[in-house]
Image: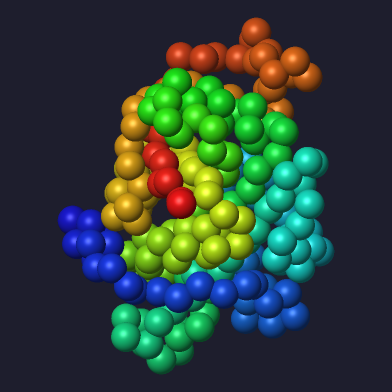
Amino acid sequence: MQVRQAERSTDLADIRFVRPMDPHDMKRMRAICDDPVNRNFVDELDQMTPQAIIDWAVGHEIGRDDGWEIMMAVVGKSSYVKESEVDRIQGVVNAYTSKLTRARILFGKSLLPPDLEALELVEIVNLRNPHAKPGQMSSGDKKVAETLRSMKGPMIAAAIVEPQNHAGAVTMEVAGFEYVGDAFFPDEDDILEDGLVDEDVDQSVLSKFYIKVLR
């Protein structure tokens, strides 16, 4: 209940780019990548070497297949955290789109109203610092959404929340994302060249689909 109450506040954190040459930022990024909860939801984190983390942080906005990727740090705000945590990384929000990402997100397109189908779908992924004070990721998601709208124009920010990730669902709801239903979403590695899913993949597990229309 404490997490839910904290996340009901509207402005608990700021955002900025990750600073790859800042040892404090890199220490926080290492903690985020090593956190078992984050690794449970993002398989690639167990392959993140120190250099891979730096490379990831260097690309504030990088090409990704035929799409793009933007990573923003959610950082402590003086009105909410103690002085030593101000401007320190509390988590990161990754926003990206590519051919594979669009193919993955399209599994939830049937849940969208017809008037939104023409907008680009961008996937949002939250990774929280395991030691961060609760409530900050929702504020970060709101501000990242505003930044995406100003940088990229109209789109739909979409978040796929696995059924066991209850805290993630609360975070998206408080950030103003709308729950539109449950659907099967494959991992990118399971999508074949024709956009279909490998027949050996279990499609019975449904995830929650959240969207925020950015216009």
Position above or below: 79 against 107: below
Relative depth, front residue between 141 and 157? 157
- Given the current orientation, which residue lies at the most extreme top position? 199
Left or right of 104: which side holds 67? right
Q: Which quadrant is the N terminus positioned in? A: bottom left
Asked if residue 24 lies left or right of residue 184, the reply is: right
Q: How is the image coloured?
A: rainbow
**Which of the two residues, 14 or 170, is positioned nearer the viewer here?**
14
- Numbered-mark total: 0
Residue at the image point whose x is 72% and y is 33% from the top: 99
The residue located at (62%, 67%) in the rendering is 29
Q: Residue at x 75, y 80 (%)?
A: 21
* Any part of residue 213 in sight: yes
Q: Is residue 94 above or below residue 165?
A: below
Residue 49: x and y, percent?
A: 77, 58
The x and y percentages for residue 212 are 41, 46
Q: Is residue 73 depicted above or below 201 in this figure?
A: below
